[in-house]
Amino acid sequence: MNVKLSAWVLTIVLCVSASAVKAQSLRFLTEHNPPGEYLDEQGEVSGVTTSLVRILQQRLDDPGTIELMPWGRALSIARSEDNIVLFETVRTTEREPWFKWVGPLKHYQMTLYGLKHRVGETPSLAALPKSYTACNYRNSATINDIKALGFTEGKNLILTSKSGDCLDMLLLGRADLMAVSELSAPEFSASAAEAGSQLVKVKYLSERKRYLAFSRNVSDERIARWQAALEQSYSDGTMRQLYQPVYSEQIIRRLEDFAANQQQKN
């Protein structure tokens, strides 16, 4: 094969490959989880994390629809279909083989909270499952942490369809304890205060990280580009500009430190 023919064949292959990549657009799925993800007044998916994802899509020239739906449905689609990106997904040992991971988007702590007038300031940990009812949302990665304390569904553990429902259950007196992330604690505490109650920490549960979870069929090269773009958004101030109005300095610094450490490794 002569040089001109070889070059022509290579051009055709590259064009076909590029077209194939473009044809495999990604479908992004998320849940109602403000301030990261929610529907605005126009019915569009909005929020600070959604905005960050859209910026990465533009920088990578890798567009895709972003849809908001119940978490259980989104998780089921992500596990069964190709070219799906599920966010914000807690990365656990069980879920590790299900997806390819880009992140973290968030790095935070989970703590068990209760209302002060119901559980006191320092309730006995051994007495928790005997004296109180816990609440958590179904399909949450925190369920096992709560069950490990002695709580059982159908007995002293209520599982809801949305995480915010548990705060309502507490304020209505239908539950006593709930798992609250470091991200949501200020908002939940303010809501409790407005209702004349005070949220108090009962027990630290675990440290969590949330990611973009990609379908296994997505190429490693594409995953690497998304990871690099995400880390760049931490280094150049993009993430900080979006997160600073709603998240603590500690949350932001953890991600910036992560990106700095990655740069040192490379």
Image: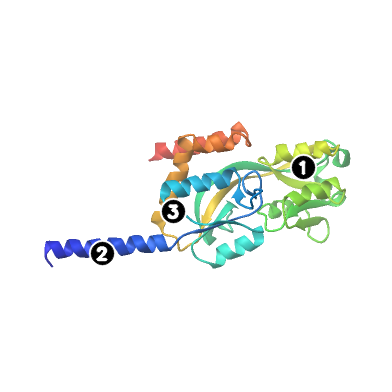
Residue located at (74% from left, 53% from top) = 136
How far across and how far down the image is residue 170, in percent?
83, 47
**Three-letter residue code for mark 2:** Ile
- Tell me which label, 1 or 2, sits earlier in the chain: 2
Q: Is residue 121 left or right of residue 69?
A: right
Type of the residue with mark 1: Tyr
Residue 130 position in % (x across, y down)? 86, 51
User: Which residue position is annotated with label 1?
Assistant: 113
Quadrant of the image occupied by residue 15: bottom left
- Residue 6 visible? The answer is yes
Mark 1 and mark 2: Cα distance apart in space: 60 Å
Q: Which residue is mark 3?
A: 62
Residue 254 visible within the image: no
Q: Count up the numbered dots.
A: 3
Query: How many other residues sit within 10 Å of disc 1, few (<14), some (14-19) or many (≥20)?
Result: many
- Label 3 environment density (alpha carbons within 10 Å; few <14, some 14–19, many ≥20): some
| Earlier-in-chain disc, 3 versus 1 | 3
Q: For this rendering, which residue is in front, 211 or 127?
A: 211
On screen, residue 147 versus residue 57, left or right, reads right
Q: Secondary structure at mark 1?
A: strand
Dot 3 amino acid type: Asp
Residue position marked by numbered label 2 in the rendering: 12
Kind of element beneath mark 2:
helix
Identify which residue, 15 or 208, lies in the foreground.
15
In the figure, is residue 83 to the left or right of 193?
Answer: left
Q: Earlier in the sequence, mark 3 or mark 2?
A: 2
Quarter containing the C terminus: top left
